[in-house]
Image (cartoon, rainbow, N blue to C red):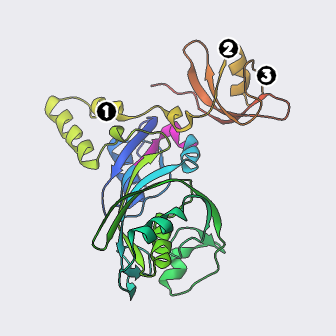
Amino acid sequence: MSRPRRRGRDIHGVLLLDKSLGLSSNDALQKVKRLYNANRAGHTGALDPLATGMLPLCLGEATKFSRFLLDSDKRYLVVARMGQRTDTSDAEGQIISERDVDFTQLQLDDALGSFRGETQQVPSMYSALKYEGKKLYEYARQGIEVPRESRPITVYELKFIRWEGVEVELEIHCSKGTYIRTIVDDLGEKLGCGAHVIYLRRIQVATYPAERMVTMEKLHELIAQAEVEGIEPRQLLDPLLLPMDSACEDFPEVNLLPVVAGYVKQGQPVQASGAPTSGMVRITEGEERKFIGVGEIDDDGRVAPRRLVVEYTE
């Protein structure tokens, strides 16, 4: 007979993991899921193993709202190694060309300026985008290049930090779907020397504060501390979680009376005073403003439920 499936906890919230170098996003997710003994978990957009930094992980009902973080802006610190171009546009790839680094600061400033604002970007072959049902990097590893359409991106801010020898450090605040490796590769080509990423750290997702990030090492330390103190690890781990509605906190709030919220919970759109005229909204219930889900203003001006929290007990 097969063993009965081990049931985990119904734990709900968002953990801001400070992902370490070399760890894949999925490995990080599975490790955190086990540490929290969570029934469900999902991440909000993968970070390459080469990259470190903020990786929001959604547990339980928070997974329903992870898509809103996928669509959010991101901020990165990146160091480019000038003079060398690689097939993956980062340090994990093979060097495909080497050229002298002989640009001036003025030329660098001009080149950086061309990336600011709304532009078009052709994704790298070493990305997880799909072509005919297969990820681009799977074709790339077979030496096959397939057509990719350029996509609109926005670079809200691109700060020059330093240029020392062959290294250029930048801070980039960008829209969803922006590939930092591609920006660095394109920068190298604009400057005629080639470039690739040797350091990449995500320092912000949406409006989440960097100081709330926690490392995997810290999680293990807390579990060891709980054992020493003779308490359940959850007593130290759970306070690290941010509320599940933090993934959509930028949406306007629509607060409903309990009787009206009851209709929403049954999937019915409702009229709500003070609601915006369009777009997504965060729905709360009663004086305690309990989060019950995300809705959208329909053509009749009603709040129509789109993602609802299943009622649960702590």
Q: Which residue sits at x=61%, y=23%? A: 284
Marks 3/1 in contact by CB < 8 Å: the verdict is no
In the rendered structure, which disc, 3 or 1, sits on the residue that comes first in sequence?
A: 1
| Distance Cα–Cα, label 2 vs label 3 | 11 Å
- Side of 270 relative to 75 (left or right): right
**Segment tinted magenta in the rendering:** 55-64
Which residue is label 1 attached to? 234
**Could you tell me the amino acid type at mark 2?**
Leu
- Residue 5: tell me if it is visible: no
Q: Which mark is residue 257?
A: 2
> Is residue 36 located in the magenta-colored stretch of the structure?
no
* Residue 288 image offset from top left, x and y in percent: 54, 14
Res 204 label: none
- Give SS at disc 2: loop
Q: Nearer the viewer, mark 1 or mark 2?
A: 2
Question: Where residue 275 sits: x, y (%)?
Answer: 72, 24
Q: Say which residue label 3 marks.
A: 271
Q: Position of residue 108 (x, y in %)?
A: 43, 69
CA distance for labels 3 and 1: 40 Å
Answer left or right for 253 relative to 93. Answer: right
